[in-house]
Image (tube, rainbow, N blue to C red):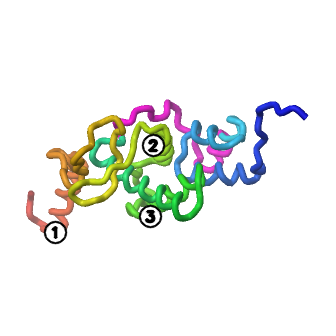
Amino acid sequence: MKKTGVKKSVVSEGEQIILATQMIKLGARLQLLESQTTISRERLIKLYKELKGASPPKGMLPFSTDWFLTWQPNIHSSIFLNIHDYLVKNAGIKNITAVLKAYSLYLQQVGHDSETEPVLSLTRAWTLIRYVDSKMLKMKECTCCSGSFVVNAYDLNQNYLCSLCHIPSRAGKTKKAKKEKELAYKLVNPGIVA
């Protein structure tokens, strides 16, 4: 019998739907669902609408490594990647299963609630793994705290300082942070105008 080069999926259709459901609940974009399951696009759209009550968001997937290197996304990406690497090395899981489990643990670690958008989305987490696998990004140990952080594989990373040990001057100085600080001041000091 001649081999055609086309592999049939070993995973049943029911398992594919369970996988797609897990990914949708964690916030996967349609392109990620299509790449990790064998379910048709039309059926994925129906499943997405059924679970989320709305159509899947449109637009391109992230395609630049730069986002992962800015200070706050770098910290969150590094937390996720450390969890992912630990699971792959010690729990014997891999591929999309490792990404989903690591992402769930990441959400627990950063104290994510259902009302706010996490810094690192599932789609970005999956993209990060692809960038690391293609050797565009890698982990580097901070010379100050010894933590492992995401860095550009092509940058000079000798004497690397992470964004926690070397916080950028504008870090955390957003309008949202200012409003939260003002609200906290008002709660602590009622009746006093800031």
The residue to which callout 1 is attached is 188
- Residue extending furthest toward the right: 1
Whether residue 62 appears in magenta in the rendering, the answer is yes
Label of residue 108 in the image: 3
Label whose residue precedes the other's in the sequence (3 or 2): 3
Q: Amino acid at mark 3?
A: Gln
Residue 186 horizontal/vertical position (percent): 16, 63
Spatial CA distance of label 3 from label 1 is: 29 Å
Between disc 3 and disc 1, the foreground one is 3
Residue 115 horizontal/vertical position (percent): 42, 56
The residue to which callout 2 is attached is 132
Q: Is residue 23 above or below residue 35?
A: below
Mark 2, residues whose alpha carbon is within 10 Å: few (<14), some, or many (≥20)? Answer: some
Mark 3, residues whose alpha carbon is within 10 Å: few (<14), some, or many (≥20)? Answer: few
Spatial CA distance of label 3 from label 2 is: 23 Å
Q: Which residues are magenta?
A: 45-67
Mark 3 touches mark 1? (CB < 8 Å): no
- Secondary-structure class at tag 3: helix
Label whose residue precedes the other's in the sequence (1 or 2): 2
Question: In terms of image quadrants, where is residue 100?
Answer: bottom right
Q: Amino acid at mark 1?
A: Val
Instruction: Please indicate whether residue 86 sits to the left or right of residue 186 in the image.
Output: right
* Quarter of the figure with the N terminus: top right
Between disc 1 and disc 2, the foreground one is 2
